[in-house]
Amino acid sequence: MTDLVRAHVHVKGRVQGVGFRAHVEYHARQLGGLTGWVRNIGYDTVEAIAEGERENVERLIETMKQGPSMSRVDESTVEWENVTGEFQEFETRRSL
């Protein structure tokens, strides 16, 4: 039996204009089996929801905490939520 989880992640810092969302989407797809989305909020925050096997979701969270080379993550939060299965793939959404 697989351990499916859902994480709601926020990272704050220099995360805009550095390819952060593309970086997250790329890694989510590379990990395989992850669904959800990533988007910008305001000028210094990226938000993501990821569902999938615990190990892969935790890897994506670590990827978000590191960010691409030109970014700087000052703080991050993770909220574990109930899996809904509502997503078909992992995608980048429009900014808020």
Image (tube, rainbow, N blue to C red):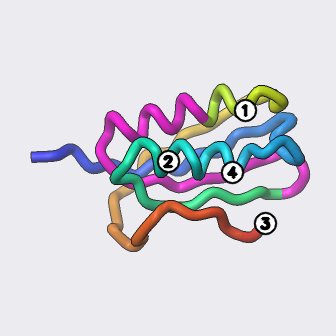
Query: Which amino acid lies under the numbered mark 1 shown in the image of this protein?
Result: Pro
Q: Start and end of the magenta stretch?
A: 42-63
Q: Earlier in the sequence, mark 1 or mark 3?
A: 1
Q: Earlier in the sequence, mark 2 or mark 4?
A: 4
Query: Which amino acid lies under the numbered mark 2 shown in the image of this protein?
Result: Ala
What residue sits 27% from the left and 49% below the top? 4
Q: In the current view of this chain or complex, which residue is farthest to the left?
A: 1
Q: Earlier in the sequence, mark 3 or mark 2?
A: 2
Q: Which residue is mark 3?
A: 95
Q: Nearer the viewer, mark 4 or mark 3?
A: 4
Disc 2 vs disc 4: Cβ atoms closer than 8 Å? no
Disc 1 vs disc 3: Cβ atoms closer than 8 Å? no
For disc 3, the neighbor class at 10 Å (few under 14, some 14 to 19, many from 20) is: few
Question: From mark 3 to mark 2, how far is it between C-alphas?
Answer: 18 Å
Indicate whether 88 appears above or below 66: below
For disc 1, the neighbor class at 10 Å (few under 14, some 14 to 19, many from 20) is: some
Q: Earlier in the sequence, mark 2 or mark 1?
A: 2
Find residue 81 and report its horizontal and vertical position in percent. Answer: 41, 53
Rendered image quadrant of residue 57: top left
Question: From mark 4 to mark 1, how far is it between C-alphas?
Answer: 9 Å
